[in-house]
Image (spheres, helix red, strand yellow):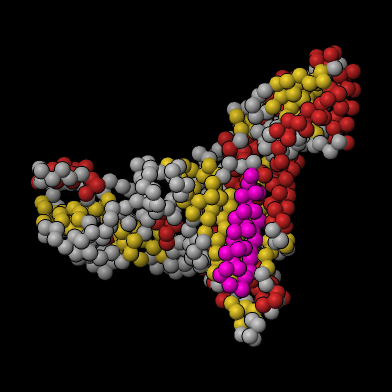
Amino acid sequence: MSTLFPHTLREDPAGAESPGHRLLIRAGYVRRVAPGIYTWLPLGYRVLRNVERIVREEMEAIGSQEVHFPALAPGELFAASGRLAMYGDLLFRLTDRKSVSYVLGPTHEELFTTLVRDELSSYKDYPLALFQIQTKYRDEARPRAGVLRGREFLMKDGYTFDLDEAGFERAYERHRAAYIRIFERIGLDFRVVAAMSGAMGGTASEEFLAPSADGEDTFVHCASCGYAANTEAVRIAVPPARDGRAEPPIDILATPDTPTIDSLVARLRELYPDRDLGAADTLKNVVLKTRQPGATEWELLIVGVPGDREVDLVRVAGALDPVEVAPADAADLAAQPALVKGYIGPQGLPDIRYVVDPLVAPGTSWVTGANVIDRHAANVVRGRDFEPAGEIGAAALRDDDRCVSCGQPLSIARGIEVGHIFDLGRRFSDTFGLDALGPDGKPVGIAMGCYGLGVSRVVGALAEQSHDENGLIWPREVAPADVHLVLAGNKDDVRETTESAAAALDRAGLRILLDDRTVSTGVKFADAELLGAPTVVVFGRGLANGEVELRDRRTGERSDVPLVELESWLRDQWAAS
Ligand code: ATP
Ligand code: MG
């Protein structure tokens, strides 16, 4: 520690957005260079490499082979796959001296697919699994919380290549199991949740989320049957479809001055004193706009949700990805005089795409806008009075929502996406002509899977999950050191004993951080807690009796241990943890 670069910080850094990020900076693990661009300092780089090592070992253990692509990739490959347009502003683009366009790879499907296409030709060459651990570039709109959402970051991306669906499914299961081992070894608390695969093709898609209040993803979990899903992909229990044809006919109601759902409900109670109508009986129609990837034109989209819920734009964006979505503004509405603000109803809408949340089930009856100022319509029935163009999960979830598979209550929590595995289908193999000659001489299209893991984000996620008010608490396998030795006091003989114990532990293969500085013991203890090695050993007064003090960083437990038995105590403690 007397030579360690850099010094720890006493004060919280300005502008750090989350507890983990703040501690990573204070402890001297990372430093910001520009928004979303960070430098790894010596201890932080150790943690990063430990995560990387675990990922590499487990990928190799399932027979995936490591390659390393350039980050700088020809723009034409991304044009061919359509992702130049799809990624839009997220791509870092550049032009070389000959005016040829390049991108800094955001992920590498294009390069993997064309490499395999150019190298292999026979069905005998398959199945194949490849991965790389590499720097990725994305010009994120909102880089956040240091290494959690960077514009330059380290990702493991893996791909599988199979001759058929059954082969893909085996590859997927192997990767899923490897991911579980990886996150268990890393010591991260995680959940596997159903996810959307966006426009990327097939159906299987799961995310690995690290529960954390600072996560940007929201997921639901059912304690009773284990169902778990990202809110982008979640399905909740909805009312059953019914035959609404026999409902009373539409009633047009005079509802002046009812700009809000509450004021509308108050008016409905006057109009229908015995029907006990509430916000949940009203249909709210929210005007959004969407834009196809690469297009400049926006199109309007109206989404219907029960009036006691908001529209959750994150869910809508997840359902429509890669189509872009935004709220419509006053100018968009002004261009459509048929849309009467505050009084929109799906019955007799002009030619605008209208979709509903599945909570607006077939045959259900609603009070909604009459498309006339100061008028609402009651008894408006889905399937009789209007037919949506489709259903998308758009309603904000609530904590009284119930599980789609068992009907029990769901819980909602936030998490950090640390991995995403999914079926690519034949999207890329078709685009780039990747196929294999089958035994009958006919070409077989290759089924691909994609397996991403945010290596640098994992370090940020660990810091969010595993700390207390005094500092970081690293799980053993990724910690920058196994033991942090604190030399308490300044007596020469204590210093000698400590240094020779450190050397002995080092020779025994333990990773040691030795605080040999001449600062106060209090400062040393504070730094030991801040840096977060799992075990701290104090060399101080106890040495008079041949003892040192072991402190468990996580539990705070202390025990006096004979110095001669220190190594075996440490090993026993780890075997138990
Ligand atoms: P997010 O929804 O968080 O933007 P993504 O869906 O764009 O993630 P993928 O394209 O599936 O992510 O990338 C694979 C993995 O790479 C993610 O699961 C995540 O762990 C990591 N990752 C993605 N973007 C970033 C980033 N900007 N900074 C750090 N890690 C990232
Ligand atoms: Mg992203």
Q: Nearer the viewer, residue 94 or 172?
A: 172
Near-viewer residue (552 or 239): 239
Residue 235 in sight here: yes
Residue 446 sits above or below residue 11 on the image: below
Secondary structure mostly seen in magenta is helix
Quadrant (top left, top right, bottom left, bottom right) of the C terminus: top right
Where does residue 169 sit, x and y in percent of width and height? 57, 64
As for residue 163 lying within the magenta part, the answer is yes
Identify the residue at horizontal 57%, vertical 68% (top origin). 166
Q: Quadrant of ligand 1?
A: bottom right
Q: Is residue 190 above or below residue 422?
A: above
On the image, the x and y values in percent for residue 387 come to 25, 65
Image point 26% across, 69% down: which residue?
351
- 291 sits left or right of 245 in the view: right
Q: Name the residue located 58 percent from the left edge and 38 percent from the top edge.
A: 464
Decide which of 278, 205 is in the foreground and name it. 205
- Residue numbers of the magenta segment: 156-184
- Residues 294 and 531: in front is 531
Side of 3 where 81 appears, left or right: left
As for residue 273 lying within the magenta part, the answer is no
Residue 420, picture quadrant: bottom right
In the rendered image, the vertical position of residue 124 relative to residue 36, given as above or below: below
| Vertical relation: 563 (above or below) 405 | above
The quadrant in which the N terminus is found is top right
How many numbered marks does the figure carry?
Answer: 0
